[in-house]
């Protein structure tokens, strides 16, 4: 293998990996599908490894393909910063794509406000926030769907850096204004196990039925409207939100942890995102 990867082959791989489609990647690069496939095959020959496998649900990346995708994403970020610095050296503004994925109760309440100052000061950052169920977030990181994920536990992956951001402290809430049934608890969906987890092993656990509100903000609205009770992070119980904490149930907590792939020479954007999240998320996870 030569000491340098061919740019056209790398571009063919990167677009195919991003779009998960040879057809769409060929259209994006303005080449025929056969030409694109040939470039990818030549790259595989050069690397001595298969990058894609085909399945019933389309194409997916091999482990080597995932490693190469992470390389392309890091290179993209470094290229964007370099071009910005060369064109406007006096500005020194951060630039490039940034994809941050988290679960719903921390994205809007902690992650976004922790990054807001950085994003306001650097409008050339192309931000993409994503909300996923906690069970899906590790796969999003592994498959290159996000640069950073925020999870409710620490992943023990040797090639991933995990940094604590704070804790979510869970409490039981009810409507502050309306009478509501004490035997109905609101969850996101049937797969949401927060209520079950909170009451597991407790002698004072109530008998309850479940109703589903789509996401944590739907749960808060449902509780405020008197549709039932819920188990939510205390930091989401804001003044004037129409809900109140039911005292008597000891809090339970989960750790909130930032994950990203270990990068030998991270771009400035990468470093400053990590610094902003580590410095800022904790205070937003504390209750009013």
Image (cartoon, rainbow, N blue to C red):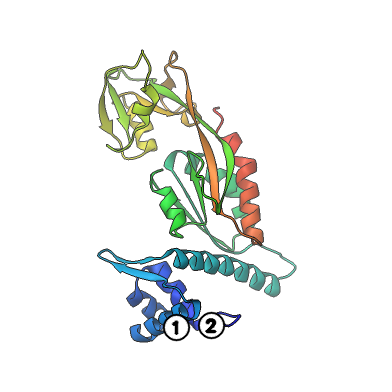
In the displayed orientation, state which residue is furthest to the right: 90
In this rendering, does residue 224 appear at all? no
Q: Nearer the viewer, mark 1 or mark 2?
A: 1
Pick whichever of labels 1 and 2 is earlier in the sequence: 2
Within-10-Å neighbours for mark 1: few <14, some 14–19, many 20+ = some
How many tags in the picture?
A: 2
Residue, disc 2: 6
Q: Quadrant of residue 205?
A: top left
Residue, disc 1: 42
Task: Identify the residue shown where x is 38% and y is 17%.
Answer: 202
CB under 8 Å between discs 1 and 2: yes
In this rendering, does residue 140 appear at all? yes
How far across and how far down the image is residue 287, in percent?
54, 28
Instruction: Check the image and report above or below for 199 versus 100.
Output: above
Task: Identify the residue shown where x is 45% and y is 68%.
Answer: 65
Quadrant the C terminus occupies: top right
Within-10-Å neighbours for mark 2: few <14, some 14–19, many 20+ = few
**The residue tagged with tag 1: helix, strand or loop?**
helix
Task: Identify the residue shown where x is 27% and y is 18%.
Answer: 207
How far across and how far down the image is residue 2, in percent?
58, 83
């Amino acid at each position: 293998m030569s000491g340098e990867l061919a740019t056209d082959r790398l571009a063919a791989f990167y677009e195919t990996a991003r779009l998960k489609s040879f057809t769409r990647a060929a259209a994006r690069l303005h080449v025929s599908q056969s030409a694109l496939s040939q470039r990818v095959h030549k790259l595989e020959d050069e690397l001595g490894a298969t990058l894609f496998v085909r399945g019933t649900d389309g194409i997916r990346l091999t482990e080597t393909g995932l490693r190469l995708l992470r390389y392309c994403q890091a290179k993209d970020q470094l290229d964007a910063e370099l071009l910005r610095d060369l064109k406007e050296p006096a500005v020194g503004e951060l630039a490039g794509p940034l994809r941050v994925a988290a679960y719903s109760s921390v994205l809007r309440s902690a992650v976004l406000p922790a990054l807001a100052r950085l994003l306001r000061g650097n409008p050339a950052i192309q931000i993409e926030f994503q909300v996923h169920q906690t069970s899906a977030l590790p796969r999003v990181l592994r498959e290159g769907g996000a640069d950073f994920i925020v999870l409710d536990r620490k992943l023990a992956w040797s090639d991933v850096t995990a940094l604590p951001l704070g804790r979510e402290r869970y409490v039981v809430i009810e409507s502050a204004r309306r009478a509501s049934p004490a035997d109905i608890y609101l969850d996101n969906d049937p797969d949401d196990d927060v209520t079950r987890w909170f009451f597991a092993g407790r002698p004072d656990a109530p008998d309850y039925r479940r109703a589903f509100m789509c996401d944590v903000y739907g749960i808060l609205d449902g509780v405020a409207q008197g549709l039932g009770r819920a188990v939510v992070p205390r930091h989401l119980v804001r003044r004037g939100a129409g809900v109140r904490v039911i005292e008597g149930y000891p809090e339970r907590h989960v750790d909130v942890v930032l994950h990203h792939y270990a990068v030998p020479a991270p771009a400035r954007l990468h470093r400053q995102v990590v610094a902003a999240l580590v410095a800022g998320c904790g205070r937003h996870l504390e209750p009013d």
